[in-house]
Amino acid sequence: MSSQYETATVSVIDEEMLQKAVEEQGPKGQAGRIAKEEGVQYNELLQLRLDYRNIPRIDHLWQFTSLTKLQLDNNVIEKIEGLECLTNLIWLDLSFNNIEVIEGLNKLLKLEDLSLSNNRISIIENMDTLRNLQILSLGNNLIDKLDNVIYLRKFSNLRTLNLAGNPVCDEENYKLFVTAHLPDLVYLDFRLLNEQTREMAYAKYQYAVEEMRHNESQEQKAVEEEQRKEAELQLHKDAFVEFLNGPHLFDSMFADDAEAAKLAYIPGVATLLEYYQSQLVELCMQVFEAGLTQHGRRAAEVQCFQDCSREAVSDNQQRAAQRAAEFERSRREMMAEIQQTTDSKFLKSQINQYMDEINTLYESLMTMELQLVDQLEEIIKEFERNISDMVGEFIEVVQGIFAQCRDLENHHHEKILEIAVATLERVAKNELDDDMPDDVRMLFVDKDTVINAVSASHDTHLGKIDNREDELVTRINSWMSALLNSIHEEEVKRNRKRIAEIDHYISYVKEQLNDLSL
Amino acid sequence: MEVPSEIELSEDVAGQEEKANEEEDGLEQLQRDPQEVEDTLRDTQITPEVLNMLRQDHHVDLSQCPDSYKENSKQEKLLLAIAENFRSQYAHLYPDRKPLLMCPRNECGVQKFVSTTLRPTLLSHPELYSWEGCASFVSEFLSMKPLEPPFDPPRHLFSPALVLQTQRGTCFDFSTLLCSLLLGAGYDAYCVSGYAVKDICLLNQSRQECPLLVPPEKRKTEEQKQEMRKYSVKPPRDLRSSFKQQQEARRQAETEAAVHKERQEAEREQEERERPPPDSLLGLRVHCWVLVLCGKRKVPENFFIDPLTGKSYATTNENFLGIESVWNHQNYWVNMQDCRFGCAKMTYDLGDAEKWEYLLFGPTSQSQQLIREQQDIENEDETDEALFEMPQSWVSPIYISQEDMESRCPGGTKVTQYRKAKLEKFAPYLLKDGLVTRLSVYDDLDCTQLKTVKEWYKNRHDHLEEKELEKTSNVTVEHFSPGRNDALKRHRYTTLIPENERQMDFYSTARVDGLASRVETPFEMTETFEDRPDFLCYRHVIFGKWPDVSKGGMVPDQGQRPLQKVVERFHRDKSKPASKDVAERSFLVSEGWIEVTYHLEDDRIIPGWHIFVKPQDSRNSLNQPTFNSEMVSSFQVDPFAKPYKELFLYEMLMSLMKEEENVILRTRESEHEIKAILTLREQENSNTELHTSIYNTTKHEKARTLWREQERKAKEEHQGLKEKERDYLAPYLSKHGNPESLTQQAAIQIRADCLADLKQHLTRHANVIQARYEKETQQLQMKQQWFQKNQLHITKEEETEYLAYCSGAMLRIRVLKQRLNRHKEEASQRYQALDEKLRRDPRLANHLW
């Protein structure tokens, strides 16, 4: 099919060719003249046709960033490349080329219509990202395995598929296989798939398709479950109390504590530990609950603030817009009037009057804006106060609970110490069982060792608790300051934008007037 | 008719009384042996007297009444006796109170107890399942006959069946019918005999507001109109002097107060004028209405229904002045409460024996009944046998036909006078233009100055439903139901001539162009659209003045008015960025401008726009219009945005110019449509047609004629078939070639053939019977011979078989013999009959005689 081109001279995509193609395909007549005068920007072009040109390599297309339709058919292209920048492409035609592998299309997320017919492709692949694909043409290629079709199940929008002229079409069940595996397909090989075919296909491949569907739905569910969990964790993180709804803190306290593992072997410690864990978990739960409720309250507060400020802004905007629209209407009338006046004196008075009006408009718009700024500032301040109160309150609560945690730890420590001393005495008296591991027994060589071990464990625990507390407090504080900063910034940005807008408009209006009076 | 002996008698049988009436001062109740009562009542048998008045008025054939109308059953007689005893004791104990209405005479002149006149009936009309439907039906279907005299209960109480037939009745008849319907529908309803004000008794509503004019109660405006939001911005500071404001407010308040006072005075004067003259019979006028108690059918509260108007009243309403007694189909209660201050403080716990004295012990009220039932179970043998229950109603079943349901009012029309308003009701299909209700509202009390006329129509072919004419401004508003080809919903106009002020609303979903309304004034037209795919929502057209005719020389035809300006507005199309989404296009046709304004971007206050000046030679298609940047002025909101490309502007101008032509075309189409609608409306008004649902068998003329036609055809076919069968001459006539008229010879021939054939047929028939007879006899004889021969050897089974055969054969023989005889008898008759028939046959008659 492409042999005839191979002998001919190949041509390279270069500036000249592009320029010519653009001019040829551009607007005609008067529009063409204007276009030519103005010059065409490649990055604004929406369509480009480069067919029948013996192009061996796709190149030099990076400028055409807003291209939606690109035709490169009937060339001698061997590799799909150089299309990464054309992210707006909707329609891509690469038929009648010498392509062997589907590749280099991953960036073309908007692609809906892809034509790769009359090439040398044997495997359908590397198109995972083309979720919007609706029409896929792969006729007259070298696809020889039916399994390739299963790959196309990914494309839920695919309605038209062309595989005619591939070796795979000679297979006995080709049509039914495709129909069964792509239930949403409407056209296959230029023909409408009728209900009868669908039924037959379904009957034939029911089992396989059902299984596939089942697996897919399972996967889907797993993904959803994952997402749900992530969302939950995110919520907890947003509330700054992640991993406090269980023995996580307790576990982490003992995970890094080598001594504790040894001490656990001392008789009587196990029950103590159990009690300790339950108490600590309970306290953690308290923090967790408090965190969630406080988070809810904070979120509601933020929501309320944002609603109110948005309402105020939109209300103000509406009024200002109305004012501006009224002015614009009268301005146009006035301009028309001024254009028609010939009496220079009258003209002057008119222009003066007009100037005054412009100034009043400017003033009133600015007043509105300043009012809004004042109002917003007030509520922002109030919000700031409230939110910092809330955060402070929360921190207080949390700190109280963590203090309880520390008390608990101290208490626990004392108990352990007691037991340790008692055990030491018993060890000294040799009253102890023999089943104590050696490294534990090593602790009880003298009093200092035991006490050191116990206090080291205690220190570790306290450190963990302190760390968790610090983490919570710093994070919530940084969250608050970030939030307030963003609110301030947004407000400043909004204000600047509005002022710039007013200025721009007023200067435009004045300019118009000056043009007219000259 | 006091029977003193009865009281003694009652004392005699006091031992048999089972009721638990232990009050000292209460009335004694009577339960007696039915036999005894019958004996006592035999002498006082009432002879049915003929009600002449009734007959004359309504031609009701009383003789066709069922027997229950003309005489009393045993139970009823017993009941009457009980009632009489009750009445006499009541009269004895309360000589001051008015006699109770207990046993009025019915249409046949027989005394019937009021409770038995109630016949609870549930009819198949869905309207009659709710109390509102029942009440409005009764009030509309019957016409009121005032009580004569107005301060005594009536002597007669007719059966609801008769009342329905005559469509006339007193308030007692009204209540009885309504109560029957309500009881049938499951309401806890009672007839109430009592006293009411004159307006209610005489069905005078001219002092009331028309219910159609009372605005529907406004729903409470959402209270939580927004609880002060925490962060709502404070309004900008007010910089005006508060002292001045106070002064201003005070001044305003003063003037307002003055105005208010004036208005109040005027209102008081008005009230004074409208107050009815004092009624000398106040508190004496007898009225009968219906009481519905709460509980059943989810009725939340007790209320009255006035059967004459069909309206409901609270039990505390001051129009009802007192209650003598209430009854339902099960019992009768006398009110023992003080009614000097109206019914406001009455309680309706009928089980309370101190407040309501009952006639029959037993089913007093629902709650009582339940308790009683429990007690019954406990001491069954004591109470069970002696309970006297209200006998079955003597009234024949109440039946309301579908036609009656539809036509409602007697004669299909009813006029009600309200305060400053007149309401006329017509049955559907009664009037040719489909009018069902007309409400005329007047400015004054005497109803002379018409203010508005509101008319409701039904079943009109042009889907007109409501028409309101304002007399002062002469504005007509018409409402249409969905289904018109032009999807017209509302039409407000003063005249049907086009290019005048009018407003047309449309069912926008039914229209392809999504048009919702079109407002016209002499030089403007505004159209609004809904849900269009191109987001167009508004089009405003300003027409220019007519060009000077003398200059143009041509007389412009209507609808070709020059366009001066067209403004089109669009909703926001979310798929486009706001700065590229057109919000408004104005085509200033006369000035050659086109203005395009875009939508506002988020938090912007000034939109972007283009103003194009159309190239002068745009009309000339050969000469491409030259385009230059002078022809367009644009404003871009974002000062940093790239300026528009000239190519883009050029293309835009071209498309806008095309669009302008389209807009002009569409405007012409709109004008055209208005004219078409107006002419159609004119036609429809002058020539109204009513349509009938194909499900309405009585009214749907076409269906009915079709149905009749079918029936007739079926009948004819049937008859034709029979006639053909019966045409005994056909084969003979065909022998002669079915001639139009027969010759005499042929006629004689036919007659002879005919008779000969009959003879032959008869003989053959006789021969067949004869042959069968002979065969049967022969067989029997053979069997008998065989039996006699082998009598000794045969088994028992064979013998029984033989005997069975013999009896069967004998029977057959007998039958055959009878048949033969009868055939012989009939044969000559049939021969003669045929002969007679032939002589009478019109085809032969001329020739045979």
Image: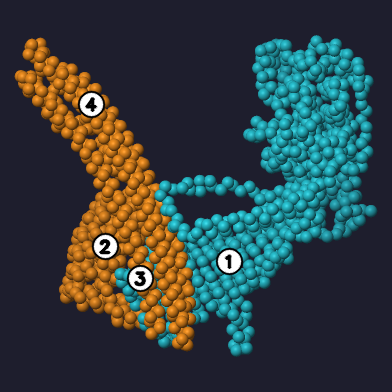
Give the label on residue B518, or none.
1
Query: Which quarter of the figure is the N terminus of chain B placed in?
Result: top right
Specify the amino acid type for callout 4.
Leu
Q: Is residue B257 visible?
A: yes
Q: Are marks 3 and 2 on the same chain?
A: yes
Asked if the residue at tag 3 contacts the one at tag 1, i.e. Cβ–Cβ closer than 8 Å, the answer is no
Q: Which mark, residue A408?
A: 4
In this rendering, the answer to whether A243 lies above or below B270 is: above
Q: Secondary structure at mark 2?
A: loop
Cα distance, mark 4 to mark 3? 66 Å
- Are labels 4 and 2 assigned to the same chain? yes
Q: Colour of chain B?
A: cyan
Q: Which mark is residue A504?
A: 3
Circle 3: is it few (<14), some (14-19), or many (20+) Cα within 10 Å? Answer: some
Q: Amino acid at mark 2?
A: Thr
Write down the colour of chain A.
orange
Q: Chain of mark 2?
A: A
User: Which residue matches tag 2?
Assistant: A87
Q: Chain of mark 3?
A: A
Q: Residue at x 42, y 53 (%)?
A: B233
State the CA–CA distance, disc 4 to disc 2.
Answer: 61 Å
Q: Earlier in the sequence, mark 4 or mark 2?
A: 2
